[in-house]
Amino acid sequence: RKEVEQDPGPFNVPEGATVAFNCTYSNSASQSFFWYRQDCRKEPKLLMSVYSSGNEDGRFTAQLNRASQYISLLIRDSKLSDSATYLCVVNGGGSYIPTFGRGTSLIVHP
Amino acid sequence: DADVTQTPRNRITKTGKRIMLECSQTKGHDRMYWYRQDPGLGLQLIYYSFDVKDINKGEISDGYSVSRQAQAKFSLSLESAIPNQTALYFCATSGGPGEEAFFGQGTRLTVV
């Protein structure tokens, strides 16, 4: 079982839709969590950190459920420009190495 | 200028050749990483380093070696390139345990 698992999608949604992604992680000692965005074959860039209390940034909301070992990303009012791959990242274990999920592809269409 | 710079950005090389990918950073971070990305597989860790004297293998280190020449520089070498090492390679840095990672723009490597 991979340490960090995501549904690869693609999620194909119309503009204005609300879409949610989940990510599960296997290491219960994991300490920090992030969502990154990656545009086609470019470098990943931090979208938002995920805190135990949740985190909201405009149309984006991230939540952490430690008991069930998953994090989520909710995107409201989807824009065409949201089309990208969303990577779940978990830092944990003894060395806090960033460990990536495979990514979830989002396609927002007119 | 980018905080994390990778060179070259694109490279085509022949099977059996030795190739070095370079990474330099201006963020003053101690932690540096090399990842490989293949379509549909996400980012896989090749090597990581927490300071100049610290080098550690990641999940897919076979066929690769690294050198941490200074805090700011971390190079990845393919001693004898093979076609299945064709991939997109990313260097990244982070400031400390649990902090976000910052990425270079990537090196697209093709081994023919």
Image (tube, rainbow, N blue to C red):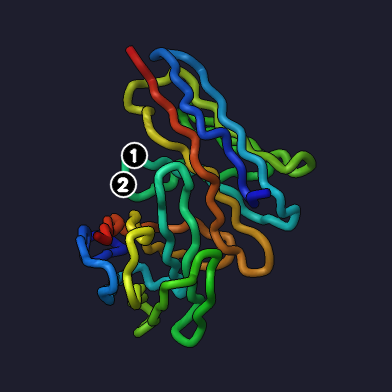
Dot 2 crowding, Cα within 10 Å, few <14, some 14–19, many 20+: some
- Whether pointer 1 and pointer 2 mark residues with C-beta atoms closer than 8 Å, the reply is yes
The residue that disc 2 covers is A42
Question: Would you say A108 lies left or right of A27 here?
Answer: left
Closer to the camera in the image, A70 or A75? A70
Residue A38 placement (x, y as % from top left): 38, 42
Q: Chain of mark 1?
A: A
The disc placed on residue A39 is 1
Could you tell me which residue is drawn at 50 percent across and 29 percent down?
A9
The answer, for residue A37, to whether it is visible in the render is yes
Q: Chain of mark 2?
A: A
Q: Mark 1 vs mark 2: tell me if same chain.
A: yes
The quarter of the picture where the C terminus of chain A appears is top left
The disc placed on residue A7 is none
In the structure shown, which secondary structural element does the residue marked by tag 2 occupy? loop
Question: Disc 1 marks which amino acid?
Answer: Asp
Could you tell me which residue is drawn at 34 percent across and 77 percent down?
B79
The answer, for residue B90, to whether it is visible in the render is no
Closer to the camera in the image, A63 or B22? B22
Disc 1/disc 2 C-alpha distance (Å): 5 Å
Could you tell me which residue is drawn at 34 percent across and 39 percent down?
A39
